[in-house]
Image: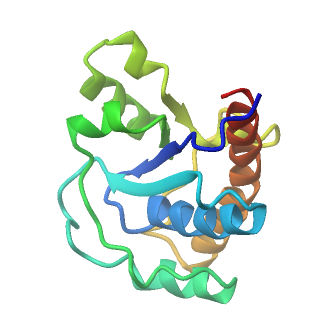
């Protein structure tokens, strides 16, 4: 039986919160809206490091996202906090380094570790693969990030929908 008041909280995490995780946040927000789930799923993003707290996403990430109709203009970088681990149902790491940082922050607490996953694992074609960091590359890297995140977010939404249907 579906609980219409159930809310799912998703946090996307990368290194600096200016490329991959805000891209995932923007894509997820738009896809949730299209799926009719925007009022039942809260989405945020954060970085494991403090370098870009308060900064907008990287210009190249914003431009690539805008080219596909995703708006990242209101997003600002923030660092993941210990309280985020308990506040979010899904802690979605972009790569193994991000996942390791989240696991370290969880301090071995099993109930928190169960919430941590790689985004790639939500797509059969990307399972086990990191969302590569495009920061030091050219514009094609940002397009590849968009391609992968778009695919993986569909699998994540299916997982969330199943979870909501059993809530």
The count of marks equals 0
Q: Give the residue furthest to the right.
A: 125
Q: Quick one: quadrant of the N terminus?
A: top right
Q: Is residue 11 left or right of residue 46?
A: right
Q: Is residue 113 left or right of residue 52?
A: right
| Residue at figure coordinates x 34%, y 54% from the top left | 46
Between residues 60 and 45, which one lies in front from this camera angle? 45
x, y percentage for residue 4? 65, 43
Instruction: State the image quarter where residue 148 is shown.
Output: bottom right
x, y percentage for residue 56? 32, 79
Q: Is residue 89 above or below residue 131?
A: above
| Residue at figure coordinates x 38%, y 74% from the top left | 75
x, y percentage for residue 45? 40, 56
Instruction: State the image quarter where residue 30 is shown.
Output: bottom right
x, y percentage for residue 92? 50, 41
| Residue at figure coordinates x 39%, y 40% from the top left | 98
Q: What is the image's colouring? A: rainbow
| Residue at figure coordinates x 70%, y 39% from the top left | 122
Q: Is residue 82 left or right of residue 156?
A: left
């Amino acid at each position: 039986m579906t609980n219409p008041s159930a809310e799912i909280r998703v946090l996307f995490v990368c290194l600096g919160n200016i490329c991959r995780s805000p891209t995932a946040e923007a894509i997820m927000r738009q896809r949730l809206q299209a799926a009719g789930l925007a009022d039942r799923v809260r989405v945020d993003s954060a970085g494991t490091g403090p370098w870009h707290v308060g900064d907008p996403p990287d210009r190249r990430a914003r431009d690539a996202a805008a080219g596909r109709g995703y708006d990242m203009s209101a997003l600002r970088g923030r660092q993941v906090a210990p309280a985020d681990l308990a506040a979010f149902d899904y802690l979605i790491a972009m790569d193994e380094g991000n996942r390791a940082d989240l696991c370290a922050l969880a301090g071995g607490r099993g109930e928190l570790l169960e919430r941590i996953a790689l985004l790639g694992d939500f797509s059969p074609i990307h399972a086990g693969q990191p969302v590569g960091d495009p920061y030091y590359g050219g514009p094609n890297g940002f397009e590849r990030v968009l391609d992968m995140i778009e695919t993986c977010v569909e699998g994540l939404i299916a997982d969330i929908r199943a979870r909501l249907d059993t809530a």
